[in-house]
Amino acid sequence: MNRLIKKILDVDDAYRNILPDGSIYAHQSDMEWAIRDYDNIILSAPCGSGKTVGAIVPWLVTGKRSRLIYVLPTTALLESIESDVKEIIDKLGLKIGIRALGETNTIAIAADYGDRRDSDLLKHNIIFTTLDFFLLRIYRTPLTPSKYRDLTSSRILNSFVVLDEAHMYDEFTLNLAKATLRLLREANVPHLMMTATLTDGLKDFLGIQDQEYHEVKVSDAEWDSFSGTRVIKGIEIYRDVESINLIIKSILDSNCAKSALIVLNTVDTAIGAYDGLKNDFDCTLLHSRFTKEDRRNNLKDAMGKLRTGSGVVISTQVIEAGIDISTPLLITELASGDSLVQRMGRCARRKNETGAVYILRKSDEEDPTVLVHPPYSNESIKSALEVLERGGSELELSRSTPKPDESSKDSKKGVKIALRALTSMYSFSKSILDMQTRSGTPVYIFCGENLKDASGKDKAWQDKQKDCVRVDVRWVWRLGDKLKDMVIYKIDEIGLSNAERTTIRPWDVLSDPIRNSPRSKKKLYEYDNKRGLRKL
């Protein structure tokens, strides 16, 4: 097989250039032969065990397909992994840039997702994308100019595809992923699934339990050997935002904490905790409802705090996976077992470190239909709590997450659309764009002062996009009756159209009318760079 980079002759030599102590784990070495000999691969390894390195380096050496498409569930995770991969490329002594014909020491890297479309025709060697954009590219989406739709989908089918952190997909997306995995298998597209928490239930849901997948995994006996020692100090019960803030303050004070990571399940809870702690501690808030620039700045500030041990970081699930930080003190809200394991992977992440973990549990609701810890199902919360209360291991915790609910509303919608994927690529992509009711549908909220410039002309889309926050449409629905006052614009191949919509569709831009006209005297939402977007 032709090598993509002739400069790299040996996988182990490449690992020694990248890994700080030169130690190579068995699953990393095994990945070279797995990529050479198999098309369908699963890599199951704990947090901090070098999964990203274990995928990129063997691919560079084996040269299995000249293009790697790295698929991730969130943009925050994508930006972090992209940075890690560029660091790997640099340590190998390779250049990043446009690759000339016959050149063997340059790698072309690009991103393809909502905020960045650096590789519209997927011509680069390594392309980072989100799952929703990957689906729209492979199924000949109308977002791609019509004369190039076959080109982008054919390039995907002739690539090596990495699907990372599959446990983070919602039930709707899991059904689309299930259909896509079947397509990749039937089209003989080599692909790799990576996660620390790929349970048997999730494998069964995705339809890969009995398929021809070669699994590279860390043994149960070695699972805890990749990190330091962390101890769960207790499970604290809270009732509301005020009580959760008092508990967090008490934990920080009792541990004389100079640095801590606090992970909460919802953006509103995280903002409430930030408001309650910011006067007593040097805090940074991380969640998905920031503009691209503010999110990047806040992430940089948070990483600095945790690496220097000099501040408190309050975050949602955006910090669960793919971000290489370690904290001696983790305070986390109760979540599903796989999510808890990912969060614990940020505490005492490295060997010889020690850390303490505190779990925050909300008091039980009387109504069993009410989610006690949204967005997680009560069943997954109950399973995780049972493992925690009997002192089970993190490996047991990772396996406690039940199989996704195939009877849920979002799951049924996913099944319906996934069936179209197997019969008609174009109608499938149209159905995604026409889907108005999926709770995870991405849209943009404009947070600038005005969509027009000083002369009254429409700003260029690039200028408007800087002031946009990407959210799920479920956030918009929470505006209730106020939603009818929102102005909805559509994004086409060129950018933001001046035409207004009457219904919301994926990637539309919504704006508070007070920012554009005197139609409304009251703002529907507000934004600042420390707290992010919140409704009023």
Image (spheres, rainbow, N blue to C red):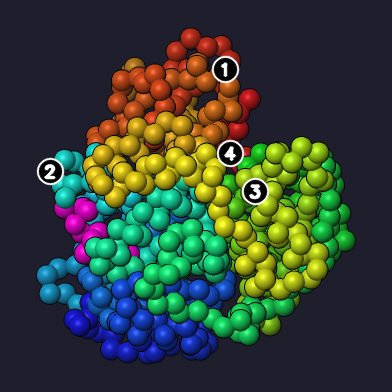
Crowding around mark 4 (Cα neighbors within 10 Å: few <14, some 14 to 19, many 20+) is many
Q: Amino acid at mark 2?
A: Lys
Crowding around mark 3 (Cα neighbors within 10 Å: few <14, some 14 to 19, many 20+) is some
x and y percentages locating residue 208 in the rendered image? 42, 65
Residue 457 painted magenta? no
Q: CA distance from mark 3 to mark 1?
A: 28 Å
Residue, far top: 519
Q: Amino acid at mark 4?
A: Gly
x and y percentages locating residue 186 in the rendered image? 27, 63
Residue at the image point whose x is 21% and y is 64% from the top: 158
**Which residue is at the front of the view, 503 or 102?**
503
| Circle 3 residue | 377
Q: CA distance from mark 3 to mark 4?
A: 26 Å
| Circle 2 residue | 147
Q: Is residue 364 above or below residue 227?
A: above
Of the numbered discs in the image, which one, if any, rests on residue 186? Answer: none
In primary-sequence order, the first of circles 4 and 1 is 1
Crowding around mark 1 (Cα neighbors within 10 Å: few <14, some 14 to 19, many 20+) is few
Which circle, 3 or 1, is nearer the viewer? 3
Q: CA distance from mark 3 to mark 2?
A: 44 Å
Whether residue 409 appears in this view of the structure is: yes
Looking at the image, do the residues carrying marks 3 and 4 touch, with CB atoms under 8 Å apart?
Answer: no
Q: Amino acid at mark 1?
A: Asp
| Circle 1 residue | 481
Relative horizontal placement of residue 174, taking residue 270 as reference (left or right):
left
Looking at the image, do the residues carrying marks 3 and 2 touch, with CB atoms under 8 Å apart?
Answer: no
Residue range (magenta) = 151-161
In primary-sequence order, the first of circles 4 and 2 is 2
Of the numbered discs in the image, which one, if any, rests on residue 532? Answer: 4
